[in-house]
Amino acid sequence: MGNKSLTNLKLPVSLIIIVLFLDQALKIWVKTHMLIGEQIPIFGNWAFIHFTENNGMAFGWEIGGEIGKLILSVFRIIAVIGIGWYLIELAKKEAPKGLLASFALIFAGAVGNIIDSSFYGMIFSESYRQIAEFMPEGGGYSSFLHGRVVDMFYFPIIKTTIPAGVQFWTSNAEPMPFTFFRPVFNIADSSIFIGTVSILLFHRKFFKHEKENLEILNSEQTKTL
């Protein structure tokens, strides 16, 4: 890798380090100071630190069962390797700094949640009805790749009730409570979301340009055959 590529990686590597530090520092604090289900108000009834754990993906989505958990953990590791490789390739191509930063955010978020699911089960005790202990004598609550991801940000900005008459998706005859935003998430989830949205909104032109370059290259190779 040339000096130019190394220079291009300074920003994304710095972002990755910052996101991972903040993500893990907050998760470890929550894990060692709060019980599952406990919450601390941040801003009235609109924002809370609400401690929960999940076995699955970002924003609390899950794949059921131990096999599902293992498959998801392995998939995450493979995905992170692929994203890391692609980030290096983008640096070699001198891609825009914004694009490098976006992929760095996605990479950092994915690694942050992999750390939880890979190691937290081994180094922490359970958080149900007790404050978790770091490196307990009897071992952690689970094994390698079977840990749970720590989530804590909860923003129930809108709490209302959906009248029964407009619930076209169900035959329920009763009003239905509705909360926005219901999922509980963490810094790693936010990093993945921001990176993905940034790519979709601001960097489509780069991929269009790459596609055009590839078509030109293929055309030239065809002519030489």
Image (cartoon, grey):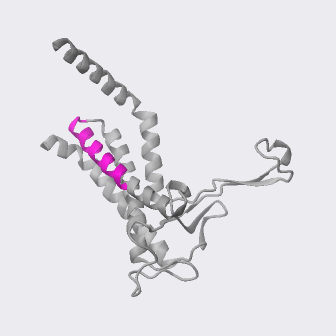
Q: Quadrant of residue 99?
A: top left
Q: Position of residue 116 (x, y in %)?
A: 42, 66
The image quadrant where one finds the C terminus is top left
Q: Nearer the viewer, residue 152 or 140?
A: 140
Q: Residue at x 63, y 53 (%)?
A: 181
Q: Residue 73's spot in the image, x, y percent?
A: 41, 59
**Residue 171, percent across and down?**
82, 47
Most extreme residue toward the left is 2
Instruction: Please give the range of residues in magenta.
Output: 77-94
Judge whether 35 appears above or below 196 on screen: below
**Outermost residue, bottom direction?**
137
112 on left or right of 96: right
Q: Nearer the viewer, residue 170 or 89?
A: 170
Q: Nearer the viewer, residue 54 or 87?
A: 54
Which residue is at 41% across, 72% downward?
A: 143
Residue 89 forms part of the magenta stretch: yes
Residue at 47% x, 48% y is 193
Where residue 209 appears, x then y in whole percent? 32, 25
Magenta stretch, main secondary structure class:
helix
* Drawn side of residue 171 relative to residue 84, left or right: right
Query: Quadrant where the N terminus lies?
Result: top left
Instruction: Look at the image and say whether residue 118 sits in the magenta stretch.
Output: no
The residue at 30%/36% (across/down) is: 96
Q: Relative to 50, is 6 on the left or the right?
A: left
Question: How many numbered circles does the render carry?
Answer: 0
Q: Residue furthest front?
A: 67
Q: Is residue 8 toward the left or the right of residue 113 in the image?
A: left
